[in-house]
Image (cartoon, rainbow, N blue to C red):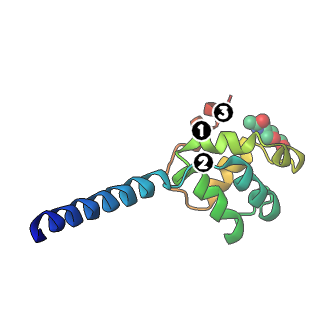
Amino acid sequence: MERPLRHLALLLGLLAWAAAAATGAAAQPACEPSNLATQITLFCMPDMPTAPCCEPVVASVDLGGGVPCLCRVAAQPQLVLARLNASHLLALYTACGGLRTGGAHLAAACQ
Ligand SMILES: *[C@@H]1O[C@H](CO)[C@@H](O)[C@H](O)[C@H]1NC(C)=O
């Protein structure tokens, strides 16, 4: 009786581990344009790459899946109202020390 139970426990343990791994994968940082745009609106001004500004800007590109995420952020209504467009965000990203280079041609990616 002991052996089958032990196998069952092992199986359940594996299932729990697999479920946790799957959940962890689903919780990977993704692009959240609305949330990121709100932070950028609060902390960013054109050509002023301050630390609180750089955090959401760099996160948009490096964690959000690249420049397409930055484009989606730039299209958010609050950023349009704050007069920050994709050019500003890409310039800030570069000024913040963002790892993806080639900002000039990346700006065209939002068109
Ligand atoms: C962003 O706005 C600036 C002026 O504020 C303008 O020169 C630039 O072309 C704009 N960029 C885009 C992508 O609209």
Percent x, y of residue 99: 49, 55
Residue at position x 27%, y 65% from top? 13
CA distance for labels 2 and 1:
9 Å
Amino acid tagged 3:
Cys
The label nearer to you, 2 versus 1, is 2
Residue at position x 75%, y 61% from top? 39
Q: CB of residue at label 3: within 8 Å of ligand 1?
A: yes
Within 10 Å of the Cα at label 3, are there few (<14), some (14-19), or many (20+) other Cα atoms? some
Q: Residue furthest top?
A: 111
Percent x, y of residue 68: 59, 38
Residue 32 visible in the snapshot: yes
Residue 94 visible in the snapshot: no
Q: Are marks 2 and 1 in contact (CB under 8 Å)?
A: yes
CA distance for labels 3 and 1:
7 Å
Pointer 3 residue: 110
Tell me the quadrant of the picture where the N terminus can be found. Answer: bottom left
| Circle number at residue 31 | 2
Pointer 1 residue: 68
Horizontal side, residue 2 vs residue 89: left or right: left
Q: Nearer the viewer, residue 51 or 77?
A: 77
Give the mark, 3 or 1, whose residue is nearer the N terminus: 1
Amino acid tagged 2:
Cys
Percent x, y of residue 58: 59, 57
The quarter of the picture showing ligand 1: top right
Q: Residue furthest right?
A: 81
Amino acid tagged 1:
Pro
| Circle number at residue 79 | none
